[in-house]
Amino acid sequence: AQSVTQLGSHVSVSEGALVLLRCNYSSSVPPYLFWYVQYPNQGLQLLLKYTSAATLVKGINGFEAEFKKSETSFHLTKPSAHMSDAAEYFCAVSDTLDFGNEKLTFGTGTRLTIIP
Amino acid sequence: DTAVSQTPKYLVTQMGNDKSIKCEQNLGHDTMYWYKQDSKKFLKIMFSYNNKELIINETVPNRFSPKSPDKAHLNLHINSLELGDSAVYFCASSDISGGGGSSGYTFGSGTRLTVV
């Protein structure tokens, strides 16, 4: 069974500071990993994904994440936080290669607050 | 054009009622999903359909019945609504061509169901 653990349900950073959101996964097969962002009262938007290509993945809005197999981690970073980054962030894993039998298993989310 | 659209956006209803949520995607994706997000923001898959065929039924009460008239539509009908059904329901779709759904999932903006 696959699972995702997001350390820290709430993270606060100052505007302009480094953003680091932690995600660790458990999967019996090589995983696909995703980060999604959810703004208030909106759906989930894909930030970036890892699908066994480059281990450093660049996404939208200046975010990136690095897949580290030895640490089973996929932490999300952004060098300089912006007020518009305030949102809920979800890490997710998908580990099946069967067409149509895929499902995303989500972490419990991290609420990012930006301090002016 | 909205890629994955859900209606209604908000739904308030009394216990015991039957209600439906509709979802349509114009991305040409083969697979569609229903996810439930509870009050603690935890997201969990309910169903997936691939080309109108039910693939995943994640131990959801049989009061919930998905229906896919074609691969662009996936509706969710809920009978005898209970207080515990209150949640945000997200529809999603994915393009699994190329293997493993590696293109990620596109989510709708959600339907907030409140049962009173």
Image (cartoon, rainbow, N blue to C red):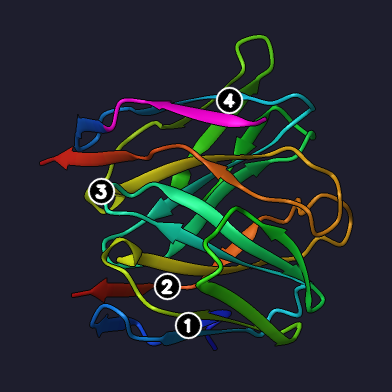
Q: Give the amino acid type for the residue marked by disc 2 in the picture.
A: Ser
Q: In the displayed structure, would residue B31 be above or below residue B36?
A: below
Q: Which element type, helix, strand or loop, lies under badge 1?
A: strand
> What's the mark number on residue A86?
3
Mark 1 and mark 4: Cα distance apart in space: 30 Å
Circles 2 and 1: CB atoms closer than 8 Å = yes
Numbered range of the magenta stretch: A1-9
What chain does mark 3 sit on?
A: A
| Residue annotated with mark 4 | A25
Q: Could you tell me residue A42's position as x and y percent?
A: 35, 67
Give whichever of discs 3 and 4 has the lower sequence position. Answer: 4
Q: Are marks 1 and 3 on the same chain?
A: no
Tag 2 and tag 4, C-beta contact below 8 Å:
no
Looking at the picture, how far across and down is residue A13, in whole percent?
A: 21, 31
Give the quadrant of the N terminus of chain A.
top right
Q: CA distance from mark 3 to mark 4?
A: 24 Å
Residue B47 coordinates in the image, percent (x, y): 63, 63
Do the residues at pointers 2 and 1 share their chain?
yes
User: Which percent across, then down, holds residue A65?
Assistant: 55, 32
Residue at 67% x, 55% y is B104
